Image: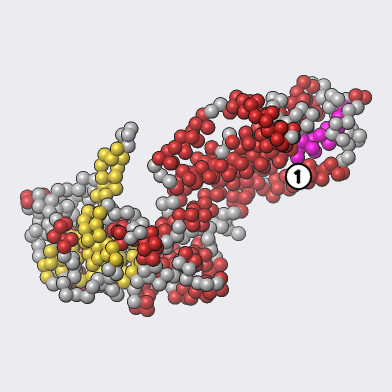
Amino acid sequence: MALVSALALAVILFAVLAGPFIWRVPINEIDFAAKLQGPSWKHPLGTDDLGQDLLSRLIYGGRISIAVGFAAMVVAIFFGVLVGAIAGMSSGRVDAALMWVTDLFLSLPQLPLLLLVIYLFREPVKGVLGVEGGAFVLIVAVIGGTRWMSAARLVRAQFLSLREKEFVEAARALGASRLRQVTQHILPNALGPVIVVATIDVAAAIIAESTLSFLGLGFPSDVPTWGSVLRDAKDYLDIAPHWALFPGALIFITVLAINFIGDGLRDALDPRRVL
Amino acid sequence: MSAPVASRAAGTAPDAAKPLLSVRDLRKHFAIRGGILSRVVDKVHAVDGVSFDIKAGETLGVVGESGCGKSTTGRCILRLIEPSSGEVWFQDADVMKMDRNALQAMRRDMQIIFQDPYASLNPRLTIGAIIGEALIIHKLVKSRQAMEDRVVQLLETVGLRPDHMRRFPHEFSGGQRQRIGIARALAVEPKLLICDEPVSALDVSIQAQVINLLEDLQEQFGLTYLFIAHDLSVVEHISTRIAVMYLGRVVEIAPAAELYDTPLHPYSEALLSAVPIPDPTIKRKRIMLQGDVPNPIRPPSGCHFHTRCPIAKPDCATRVPELRESKPGHWVSCHYRG
């Protein structure tokens, strides 16, 4: 399952990376004569209401969606592991304070928060990093910043149980420093579930970006992402179903593939696996 | 009860050579927190005033039921658990007052072998990395090659093959894993080895192998053992002297043979009567103790054993017996025996 998924993801990645060099139709070439057409040889995935070629738009959009997904996952896992590890190793007040913050973030309604943050910071960030770069950084930060909690709780729970294990005690008896105990003994044994959460986070981030784009809060409306293409398609579902079908299917396949890869990775990284 | 004991060398004659390890009135109370404000509502008296000496080269066996504080004592000596009070003297240095650097240096001389060979090895490291870790921490080897050579040497010392170095713990049996744990402890060339029930988790046939290995190593490297077990027949074989613990206190310390022949404390008697004798013609009275071990959160007053003791008298509930030398080298804490 993981292998098939890896293959599927590899095909999608290859398509979005190399696609523009093979399929050279511009993403914003407007052709009203060919609007809302179904799949054909000229437009393999059909066209949208402006007659723009969907294949090239989805290829380009895939780059953004997948990049956002992975970048947001890295941000979320980094903060999650950091907070969880500190909380798990320290006991008492530091632990309680960090978990309080985690619960706080968990109980915040995310969507309104996202809207507020993007509304407040879109202009300043845009000024520094440009339109697309600014939107990318902001979206990654916002998605990553609201998704680190599950990783943090997971890592903390793992640390709490692992740090009492005898092999960690043995390391302490040998005189291993705290940092060494964490990096050599505790963290590697805590990573299995984290990898699974990480892949779920990639999937969730892709969907979150789609949601933001759908709400018109993601990238500028002329930049296609899988989510924004889906949003544009929603008004034409009855006359041009292909328009929504293809981005939807791409999100679905990518997310599913990443989840299966996560399961496979966890098994593959476990030395106890019988070969 | 503890003050007089603390002032004397329990379990050794006064003119004996200086002990390698001296434990004086060691206590560990685990706090139980409860309520909304998580105040300390109670304390578990895991170790409640333990004193003993170990001379270089000897093996002190520590026996007692589960939960009597044997393992906690071992861990407190290494400061893997911080004791609540008491003194631990190792080679004329007070372990309790050591700062981080001194403690780090001390860890080269004192090591521990754990009970559960399945939990005591990191499943993600190879055997080479597990044994080599100590060498890295204490900077005992200069190069990678030197480390591998040393690991191979250690593996051969404990009866494993050099090629086992590249394997992971899950590929080994319980007995082999315990050998790996022993090799890890030996890597720093310790003087004292605390063996925390090293064979309890193993099959009987494997137990003998591991105990023989420990004996060979003791001879080869001049090791001193603190050998914790709940099984008297295991301890009898390896120990020079044996300490019997009950509810956080030492009730009797004596040379191994003497303890087996003439146990003084009623608890030791009961414990020994549970050891099977491999000769059906010998009949022995089995002493069955009534009731369970009392809760260490509220240990019985006076002598901890008086609630189950067959010879208890009313004053046992009020007076705490101190550990006194009944015969040379044979110490017992009972008002009416010895």
Q: Secondary structure at mark 1?
A: helix
The quarter holding residue A123 reads top right
Could you tell whether B36 is left or right of A32 in the image?
A: left
Q: Which residues are magenta?
A: A51-63
Question: In x, y percent, where is residue B139?
Answer: 48, 68
Give the vertical position of B291 relative to B194 (above or below): above
* Quadrant where the image shows the N terminus of chain B: bottom left
Q: Nearer the viewer, residue B3 or A194?
A: B3
Question: In x, y percent, where is residue B209?
Answer: 39, 72
Q: Is residue A211 magenta?
A: no
Q: Is residue B45 visible?
A: yes
Question: In x, y percent, where is residue A78?
Answer: 58, 44
Q: Residue at x 70, y 45 (%)?
A: A5
Count of marks placed on residues: 1
Q: Residue at x 22, y 75 (%)?
A: B17
According to the picture, the residue beneath numbered tag 1 turns out to be A13
Q: Residue at x 53, y 45 (%)?
A: A82
Q: Chain of mark 1?
A: A
Could you tell whether A41 is left or right of B211 in the image?
A: right
* Quadrant where the image shows the C terminus of chain B: bottom left
Question: In x, y percent, where is residue B332?
Answer: 14, 63
The quarter holding residue B253 reads bottom left
Q: Nearer the viewer, residue B95 or B291?
A: B95
Q: Is residue A57 magenta?
A: yes
Could you tell whether B210 is left or right of A196 in the image?
A: left
Q: Residue at x 9, y 52 (%)?
A: B319
The quarter holding residue A259 reads top right
- Mark 1 closeness class: few <14, some 14–19, many ≥20 residues within 10 Å: some
Give the vertical position of B124 relative to A10 (above or below): below
